[in-house]
Amino acid sequence: MDVQPLGPAAQDFLDVMAEVCTPVTVVTTIDDGVPHGTTVSAFTSLSLRPPMIAVALDLTSDLLVKIRRTRRFGVNVLGVSQDRLAVQFAGKGSDKFAGVAWSPDEGLPRLVDAIGWLSCRAESFLDGGDHVLIPGRVESAVALPAAPLAYHRRVFGTHSGFLGSTA
Ligand SMILES: Cc1cc2nc3c(=O)[nH]c(=O)nc-3n(C[C@H](O)[C@H](O)[C@H](O)COP(=O)(O)O)c2cc1C
């Protein structure tokens, strides 16, 4: 695949998106008995009836190849103390689960201490430029409320309510 240089508009686009605070998730699947996972911030809620979410994966993602095969994936929403996991799963290779505490849930890799867990069926694979958008039908969901890991200006942090907020 030819990699085109970024034009000025694309750099402005990146600068705007860096201002957008995003969640940090590790999206996982098990292909041929082997777990694989990738750090993903392009994760959003999509529909309530039926419950659906969407993730976007780069065309070069190994996880994308595996999800095209398995048609199922898990979303682990990371908590504030899991930035090390976010870095580990942002790497390449087949050993990203080394030293990671996880267990299978509905046949998908669920990370211990993730603050949210969704097991999903991939509904389709939609062209999104250099990414592929995957709408996922949510089959099960578990929330373990705690402070979230967030990503803003290429730095990990968290969210907290305004002083005095009761939320
Ligand atoms: C905070 C953060 C967010 C990321 N979000 C995405 C994303 O939404 N989609 C994506 O394809 N890659 C994303 N990445 C990059 C992938 O994690 C990285 O390219 C990874 O090596 C891909 O692994 P794979 O080829 O095993 O799938 C993100 C990386 C970081 C650090």
Image (cartoon, rainbow, N blue to C red):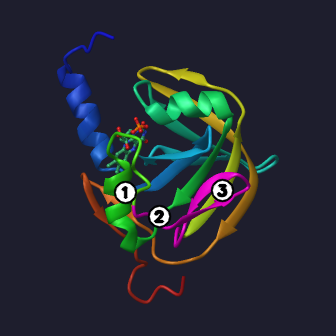
Q: Are marks 2 and 3 in contact (CB under 8 Å)?
A: no
* SS assignment at label 2: loop
Q: Which residue is mark 1?
A: 86
- Mark 1 Cβ and ligand 1 under 8 Å apart: yes
Numbered range of the magenta stretch: 99-114
Q: Are marks 2 and 1 in contact (CB under 8 Å)?
A: yes
Q: Position of residue 121 (x, y in %)?
A: 72, 41
Q: Measured from the top left, where is residue 167 in percent x and y?
A: 54, 82
Which residue is tagged 2? 78
Q: Give the image quarter of residue 4.
A: top left
Disc ID at residue 118: 3
Residue sitting at x 65%, y 36%: 135
Residue 103 magenta-highlighted: yes
- What is the secondary structure assignment of the residue under circle 1? helix
Taking depth in this image into account, of 147 and 86 the one nearest to the observer is 86
Which comes before the other along the chain, label 3 or label 1? 1
- Residue depicted at x 59% and y 65%: 116
When the figure is inspected, residue 28 is found, relative to residue 79, above or below; the finding is above
Q: Quadrant of residue 112?
A: bottom right
Q: CA distance from mark 2 to mark 1?
A: 8 Å
Residue type at numbered disc 3: Leu
SS state under label 3: strand
Which badge, 2 or 3, is on the more N-terminal residue?
Answer: 2
- Quick check: which quadrant has ligand 1? top left
Q: In terms of sequence position, does the residue under pointer 2 or pointer 1 come before the other?
A: 2
In what quadrant of the picture does the N terminus appear?
A: top left
> Marks 2/3: CA distance?
12 Å
- Horizontally, residue 101 falls left or right of residue 155, namely right
